Image: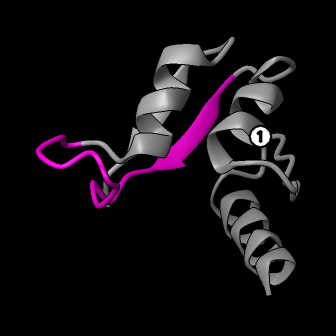
Amino acid sequence: AGLEVLRLAEERVLRERPAFTVRCRSGAGSASAELVDASQGARLVVVGSSGAGPLTGLLLGSTTHAVIHHAACPVLVHRG
C-alpha cells in the first residue's frame, strides 16, 4: 500500500509541475533517518506536518522536526 501512495504522489506532483524531477523511495528505517539520508543528494526535501507527534505543544511533529534540523538541503514543510 505504501508504494501505491508514493506512486500516486509522484503522479500528482508531475501532473501539476511537469518540469520537476521527483524521486520516491521506500525504506526500512525511521522516517526521519530515511529523509535525512535522502537529503544528501537532493535539492529539496518536502515533508508534511500534522503536528500530531509525541512532542506535545510543538507545531511540528517529531519527524519533521528532526528532518529540518539534520537535512543536507533545504526542507519545505507543507501544512495542508
Quadrant of the image occupied by residue 11? bottom right
Which residue occupies 34% across, 55% down?
53
Where residue 12 sits: x, y (%)? Answer: 68, 69
Residue 28 vs residue 21, the one in the foreground: 28
Mark 1 lies on residue: 34
Where residue 80 sits: x, y (%)? Answer: 32, 61
Residue 38 vs residue 53, the one in the foreground: 53
Is 25 drawn above or below residue 74 in the view shown?
A: below
Which residue occupies 58% across, 16% down?
70
The range drawn in magenta is 44-59
Where residue 43 sits: x, y (%)? Answer: 73, 20
Q: Is residue 57 left or right of residue 47?
A: left
Q: Is residue 5 left or right of residue 51?
A: right
User: Within 10 angstroms of label 1, few (less than 14), some, or many (20 or more) residues?
Assistant: some
Is 55 drawn above or below residue 11 in the view shown?
A: above
- What secondary structure is found at the residue carrying circle 1? helix
**Is 16 in the magenta?**
no
Where residue 28 sits: x, y (%)? Answer: 87, 56
